[in-house]
Image: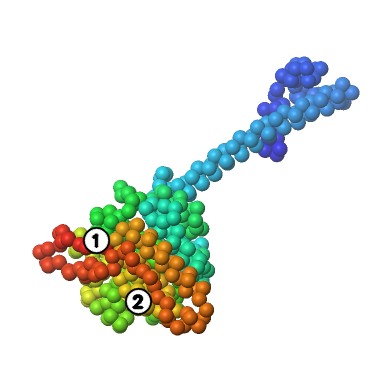
Amino acid sequence: MLLILSPPNLHYCRRFPLSYFGSMLSFTGKTFDDIVTTHDMPSSENIVFLRRYLVVLVFFAAIVFVYNSAHSLRSLSDSQSVSSSSNFFPFSDEVASQDNAEYRLGRVLNAAANKDKTVIITTLNEAWAMPDSIVDLFLESFRIGDHTRQLLKHLVIVALDDKAFKRCLSLHHHCYALLTEGVDFSKEAYFMTPDYLKMMWRRIDFLRSVLEMGYNFIFTDADIMWFRDPFPRFFPDADFQIACDHFSGDSFTVHNRPNGGFNYVISNNRSIEFYKFWYESQENYPGYHDQDVLNFIKHDPFISEIGLRMRFLDTAYFGGFCEPSKDMNQVCTMHANCCFGIKSKLHDLKILLQDWRLFMSLPQSLKLSQGYSWSVPKNCSIGVPHPPATAPMENEGDGDDEEEDFET
């Protein structure tokens, strides 16, 4: 009401002839000025007029107030609708500008981080986000794992396309949409195809940005099942720790075969420089994915120059179909590596979760007997995974050598 009776609106109302209100007044042709400027003492007629005028003025002001309020609420609702649409469906709007993307990422990371500014990150595209697909098994593993459910509050799902983002919003609290202009990451990216390579390198660049924002992270592929809290198994003095397809028995030697699907990284100058070096090294090894390039550069003197402390994680705790963890009393994670195709992954991961449920239902004495083990892989091609890539000679690097059909 104060807004309606502001000086401009009062002036507007007082200049209306009372005849404007027709039969509502018995006086015609008079305005408020006719009364308030008179030097005579108010007569009974003028008092009646003033009363009627004030009633009409209040009535008119009420109409304007209701109209303005409705218009303001409608405008607010429209603006909130636009804002909500931008937040929930960022791929269809211009909200993917660099500044806004960093702001949105900062909000998501801050909401998910623990007290040490550590988050768990996975990436998701439409193929893995379909109902009853990889992401459902991934989240289920946290719920049925040994004290892993509480870790879900620190998980950030990075969606690589619009449908994956919408599915994430229906499943989880912390979702972030990562737009890559001109690239469609929605379909299943088969190993070593151009889209697969783009997806892998986009991931490395994104994780570098997370480190630059001051956050530590565990990166995990969504086809890794979480059965125990991995933090007690990490080295306390390492900058970069990574799981292995095959573990040599020594966490300090670079002769292990790392798998980029699971790593724990501390944010500091060393790790940031390492991720920059890793990403930029793709130019020296065109046609190779991030994991092969890591195998090339782990011997590079630059790693020692920046003082990066690198450790390789034991498959006894961080296993996979390449090299399964043998003791279910010790396993933290199991990865559907050495496996080609989403159908094979889904089949064997479902069996893996069944194995875990059965193990957890056993009496403690049977658990400790170590007489129970995994019944997978089955459909996944365990055989011999693709051999370690050999660094190209100086005059090579076209990346056209035939690769085995295995997804990492």
Q: Is residue 293 left or right of residue 111?
A: left
Residue situated in front as seen by the camera: 294 or 124? 124
How many numbered discs sit on the rendered protein?
2
Q: Classify mark 1: helix, strand or loop.
A: loop
Which quadrant would residue 189 be assigned to in this image?
A: bottom left
Residue type marked 1: Asp
Residue extending farthest left: 395
Where disc 2 sits, the SS reads: loop
Spatial CA span between label 1 and label 2 = 22 Å
Q: Which mark is residue 22?
A: none
Picture quadrant of residue 105: bottom left
Q: Residue at x 44, y 76 (%)?
A: 231
What percent of the width, then of the height, locates residue 30? 76, 19
Q: Quadrant of residue 206?
A: bottom left
Location of the C terminus (image quadrant): bottom left
Residue 124, given in percent of the width and then of the height, sits at 39, 57
For mark 1, what is the residue?
405
Whole-percent x and y of residue 196?
A: 28, 57
Which residue appears farthest toward the right when viewing the image?
44
Residue at 80% x, 20% y: name it.
25
* Residue at 31%, 64% in the rendered image: 380
Residue drawn where x is 32% and y is 63% of the image: 379
Residue 118: x percent and y percent?
45, 69
Residue neighbourhood size for the residue with mark 1, other residues' Cα within 10 Å, grouped as few (<14), some (14–19), many (≥20): some
Query: Does label 1 or label 2 sit earlier along the sequence?
Result: 2
Is any part of residue 11 visible from this angle? Answer: no
Q: Is residue 406 left or right of residue 150?
A: left
Disc 2 target residue: 315
Is 283 above or below relative to 94?
A: below
Q: How is the image coloured?
A: rainbow
Which amino acid lies under the numbered mark 2 shown in the image of this protein? Answer: Thr
